[in-house]
Structures are given as structure tokens and as C-alpha cells.
Image (tube, rainbow, N blue to C red):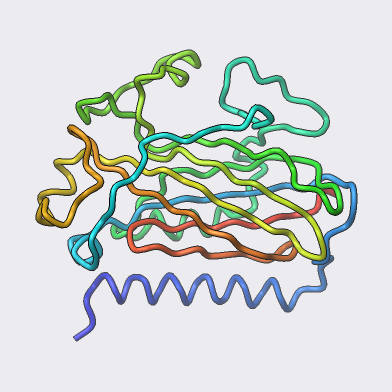
């Protein structure tokens, strides 16, 4: 008999397949155009389960992300939006239906949904985009309530999602994800023996997702891992 988790994932795949098929059937401009603005939309969610955690051993993970000097940090209080780079409000989201579908399913938890506008230059790798989201933890694994923009930059915070997306435009868009995920160790060890966990430091457990994807404009991409998932799509700005 299929598990509830597998059935839920099958239903989600069906929904996403419909979204992809609809996008492919529409008459849209899906080849990159040089030197223009694009909207990038990103949804990251968790799918933590006992089954997934016990499916493999979890190696040591470095618990930080190294940011190049050129990194665009929308969530930094000192960041100033420009005509080229700007963070978009939820009213500009184009993947709200997909996010709502995930939120309706108790097996998934949306950790981050954001969109931004940026330029793409043919043949060039653009500065990486840094993003953070989900719950912020202290070093004991306790969730924190943040009240100001300055709180977001506290060096002692451990964000549930902390990653970078680097994009390059050639014949297609090349995407490179490097994401560090953080969870309270107590939430992980109740599902799996610590003997299978080399990724726990103190009261926190760390997981990393590194993925590359090649895509076209207006093509919804689904990136799966045992514990987390990513939806990403790039739209030309009219």
C-alpha cells in the first residue's frame, strides 16, 4: 500500500506536471534575450519525515555559506534597490498557486517564497543572490522572534534556509544553487539514530543542497532532495 507521504508527493507532482504542460503549450517567449531584465521567483519548502531521514546516512556539513564580495543581499538593511536589482512584493508573485498547493498539504512546509528583478547579460555569470528564510534559531536550537531589520543580520543567528543562487545566461539560463539548511538537532534525532548523523554540531543539525539546473524562460523547474524541495521560474520583464 502506498504511504500517505508518497500519495501526497504524487498529487504534488501531478499539479506541477499540469503547470509545466500549460507553460509549454502557451505561446511564450522562452529563449533568453540578451541584456534585459528578468523576474526570478523562488519557493523553498521542507518535507522532513522519518522515512526520508532514515533513507541514508548524513555526512558532515560545513555550517556556513561563503559569500563573494559581489553578492546581492536583498535582505541586508544597507541594500538599496535600483532599476537593475529590486526585491518584489508578494502582489507581484507569479507562483502563488503553486505555493498555496504546497501550504494545503501537511507533508510540506513552505520556508521561503520570494521574487526579485535582475538584469541578465548574454555570456556572463551574474553576481550571486543571497537569500535567508524560514525560522531563525539561536545556537541552542531555540526559535527566535525577530523585530527589526538589524536582527536579521545577527551573526549568531542560524537561519533554517541560508543560500545562494547564481545565474548565467548563454543559450539557456544556467542556475547554481548552494543552500545550507539548519534544523534543531532534537527535531532530527527523534526520527533517526545519531549513528547515522555526522551533521550535528551542538544543538543544531545541518544539511546542504547543491544543485545545477539549465532552463528556459517561463519554464517551471522542480528540484527535489530527500528533505527539501525547490521551485524556480524565470520570467522576462515586459
- The location of residue 17, given as percent across then percent down, is 55, 76
Instruction: Specify whether 219 is left or right of 186.
Output: right
Q: Residue at x 32, y 21 (%)?
A: 145
**Picture layout, residue 2 above or below residue 128:** below
**Picture layout, residue 91 above or below residue 227:** above
Instruction: Specify whether 187 is left or right of 107.
Output: left
The quarter of the rendered structure image containing the N terminus is bottom left
**Picture layout, residue 76 above or below residue 131:** above
Q: Residue at x 83, y 45 (%)?
A: 37
Which quadrant holds residue 215?
Answer: bottom right
- The location of residue 70, given as percent across then percent down, is 69, 30
Q: Nearer the viewer, residue 236 or 33?
A: 33
- The location of residue 18, given as percent across then percent down, is 57, 76
- The location of residue 162, given as percent across then percent down, is 45, 38
Q: Residue at x 22, y 27 (%)?
A: 142
Q: Residue at x 10, y 50 (%)?
A: 190
Q: Nearer the viewer, residue 201 or 164?
A: 201
**Picture layout, residue 143 above or below residue 226:** above
Query: Residue extending furthest bottom?
Result: 1
Amino acid at each position: 500500500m502506498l504511504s500517505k507521504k508518497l500519495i501526497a508527493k504524487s498529487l504534488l507532482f501531478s499539479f506541477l506536471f499540469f503547470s509545466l504542460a500549460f507553460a509549454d503549450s502557451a505561446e511564450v517567449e522562452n529563449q533568453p534575450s540578451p541584456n534585459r531584465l528578468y523576474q526570478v521567483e523562488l519557493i523553498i519548502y521542507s518535507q522532513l519525515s522519518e522515512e526520508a531521514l532514515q533513507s541514508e546516512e548524513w555526512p558532515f556539513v560545513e555550517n556556513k555559506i561563503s559569500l563573494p564580495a559581489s553578492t546581492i543581499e536583498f535582505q541586508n538593511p544597507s541594500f538599496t534597490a535600483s532599476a537593475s536589482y529590486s526585491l518584489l512584493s508578494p502582489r507581484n508573485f507569479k507562483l502563488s498557486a503553486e505555493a498555496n498547493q504546497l501550504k494545503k498539504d501537511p507533508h510540506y512546509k513552505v520556508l521561503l517564497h520570494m521574487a526579485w528583478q535582475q538584469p541578465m547579460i548574454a555570456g556572463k555569470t551574474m553576481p550571486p543572490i543571497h537569500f535567508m528564510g524560514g525560522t531563525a534559531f539561536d545556537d541552542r536550537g531555540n526559535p527566535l522572534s525577530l523585530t527589526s531589520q538589524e536582527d536579521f543580520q545577527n551573526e549568531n543567528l542560524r537561519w533554517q534556509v541560508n543560500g545562494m543562487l547564481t545565474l548565467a545566461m548563454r543559450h539557456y539560463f544556467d542556475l547554481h544553487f548552494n543552500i545550507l539548511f539548519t534544523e534543531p538537532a532534537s527535531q532530527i534525532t527523534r526520527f533517526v539514530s545519531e549513528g547515522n548523523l555526522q551533521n550535528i554540531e551542538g544543538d543544531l543539525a545541518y544539511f546542504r543542497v547543491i544543485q545545477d539546473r539549465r532552463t528556459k524562460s517561463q519554464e517551471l523547474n522542480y528540484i527535489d532532495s530527500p528533505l527539501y524541495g525547490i521551485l524556480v521560474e524565470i520570467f522576462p520583464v515586459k
